[in-house]
């Protein structure tokens, strides 16, 4: 049942990304281009995502276990450190330059576009390099999720 649920959630998420045009780099770059011909339509998508997520997190906070009987794990860390800021900056620059972030890029793999394939390949390479190199944050060993305080 867990695999079927994960497959359904992945298909639903991917379909939502495709329908909302989040897999279209030109649409994403248009949304991020505040100084040029800004396209605010992806803001509606983000508001819709928040409208779905907020009640979901509220429900999850009240339940010790998920509907599939897995422990409920909600992030509890709220500290802002150099690693978080640097990671967010790298993510933002990459998103603005390529017009992709990881979820939409994986959803766009089905298009077979060379730019998508290159983005996903470099994303995988970046993850592999991070895991292989010794410059991880000293807090990397701390768990970043768990039961949130009530």
Image (tube, rainbow, N blue to C red):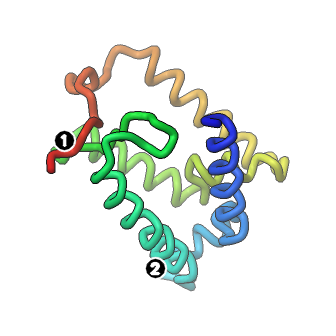
Residue occupying image coordinates x 44% and y 73%: 51
Say above or below: 16 vs 38. above
The residue at 59%/75% (across/down) is 30
Left or right of 30? Residue 138 is left
Left or right of residue 130, residue 146 in this image: left
Q: From the image, tell me which residue sits under label 2.
A: 34
| Side of 77 relative to 95 (left or right) | left
User: Residue 28 location in percent, x, y?
Assistant: 59, 68
Residue lying furthest right: 112
The one of 77 and 30 positioned closer to us in this rendering: 77
Task: Locate residue 121, reporting x and y percent.
Answer: 67, 34
Identify which residue, 133 or 66, lies in the foreground: 66
Can residue 32 be seen at all in this image of the molecule?
A: no
Vertical position of residue 100 compared to residue 120: above or below: below
Q: Choose between 86 and 45: the one closer to the eye.
A: 45
Does 9 sit above or below residue 48? above
Mark 2 Cα-neighbour bin, 10 Å: few <14, some 14–19, many ≥20: few
Q: Residue at x 26, y 28 (%)?
A: 143
Placement of the N terminus among the 4 image quadrants: top right
- Give the distance between the C-alpha atoms of the residues marked 2 and 1, in whole angstroms: 27 Å
Q: Which residue is mark 1?
A: 81
Which element is circle 2 on?
loop
């Amino acid at each position: 049942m867990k695999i079927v649920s994960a497959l359904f959630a992945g298909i639903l998420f991917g379909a939502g990304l495709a329908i909302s045009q989040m897999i279209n780099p030109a649409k994403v770059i248009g949304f991020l281009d505040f100084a040029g011909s800004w396209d605010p339509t992806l803001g509606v998508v983000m508001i819709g995502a928040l409208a779905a997520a907020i009640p979901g997190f509220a429900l999850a906070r009240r339940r010790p276990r998920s509907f599939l009987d897995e422990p409920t794990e909600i992030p509890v860390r709220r500290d802002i450190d150099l690693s978080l800021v640097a990671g967010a900056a790298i993510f933002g620059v990459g998103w603005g330059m390529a017009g992709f972030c990881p979820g939409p890029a994986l959803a766009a793999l089905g298009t077979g576009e060379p730019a998508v394939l290159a983005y996903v390949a470099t994303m995988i390479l970046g993850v592999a390099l991070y895991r292989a190199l010794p410059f991880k944050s000293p807090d990397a060993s701390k768990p970043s999720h768990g039961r949130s305080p009530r």
